[in-house]
Image: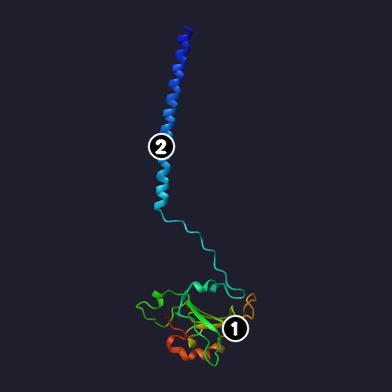
């Protein structure tokens, strides 16, 4: 009788082990399938792009021009220094905080620029390897109707790690920019 009881207990234990193993295998299969589905779902979605760090203005410049080099560039190639010099002496690039579709909806630039436009010209002085000049034009409705509501300000620095400082504003700039009044006072047109 003891042998029969031992055999029955052994069979019961074996049945429990088999049942447990079958359940565990089924659960394991379900987990593997769920994991594969999740992996497939992740692969089908857009990859998550890391957030770009906030643009920081160059030292001494206002925050509204931070990241200006990511704006629409008006000139296709850098603008070389003008023979005989110019007030923005150096190799220049000009950017605007508008889209191509906004300022050239049919492929040709339209004037005037919309209110809120900011144009930034940077220049690397001859013989230097850093931006030494920043000229900014801001279009603000009602600020200066005589000059199509543009404000002008120019900054310079003498070293790559120096802060920019203001050297010219409005009236100093108007006389020169009046020569291009027909293209809204901005010398560089969209190329």
Name the foreground residue: 63 vs 88.
88
Label pair 2/1, CB-CB below 8 angstroms: no
Name the foreground residue: 151 vs 72.
72
What residue is shown at x 42% (from left), y 50% (from top)?
Answer: 42
On the image, numbered disc 2 is attached to which residue? 30
Mark 2 or mark 1, whichever is nearer to me: 1
Residue 71, percent from left and from top: 48, 73
Element on which disc 1 rests: loop
Q: Would residue 32 appear left or right of 123 to someone viewing this image?
A: left
Instruction: Mark 2 or mark 1: name the one nearer the start of the chain.
Output: 2
Q: CA distance from mark 2 to mark 1?
A: 69 Å
Residue 91 seen in the figure: yes
Q: Where 20 sits versus 190, above or below?
A: above
Element on which disc 2 rests: helix
What residue is shown at x 46% (from left), y 84% (from top)?
Answer: 188
On the image, numbered disc 1 is attached to which residue? 127
Residue 165, percent from left and from top: 63, 80
What residue is shown at x 37% (from left), y 81% (from top)?
Answer: 108
| Outermost bottom residue | 84
Residue 138 seen in the figure: no
**Callout 2 environment at 10 Å: few (<14), some (14 to 19), or many (20+)?**
few
Residue 153, percent from left and from top: 56, 82
């Amino acid at each position: 009788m003891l042998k029969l009881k031992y055999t029955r207990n052994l069979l019961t234990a074996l049945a429990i082990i088999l049942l447990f193993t079958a359940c565990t295998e089924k659960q394991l299969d379900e987990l593997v399938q769920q994991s594969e589905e999740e992996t497939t779902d992740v692969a089908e979605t857009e990859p998550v792009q890391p957030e770009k760090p906030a643009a920081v203005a160059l030292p001494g410049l206002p925050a509204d021009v931070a990241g200006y080099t990511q704006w629409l560039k008006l000139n296709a190639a850098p603008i070389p220094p003008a023979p005989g010099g110019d007030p923005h002496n150096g190799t220049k690039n000009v950017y605007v905080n508008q889209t191509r579709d906004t300022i050239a909806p049919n492929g040709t630039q339209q004037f005037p620029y919309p209110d809120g436009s900011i144009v930034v010209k940077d220049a690397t002085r001859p013989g230097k390897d850093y931006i030494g000049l920043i000229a900014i034009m801001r279009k603000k409705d009602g600020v200066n109707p005589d000059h199509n509501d543009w404000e002008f300000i120019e900054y310079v620095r003498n070293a790559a790690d120096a802060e920019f400082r203001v050297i010219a504003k409005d009236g100093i700039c108007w006389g020169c920019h009046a020569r291009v009044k027909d293209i809204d006072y901005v010398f560089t047109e969209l190329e």
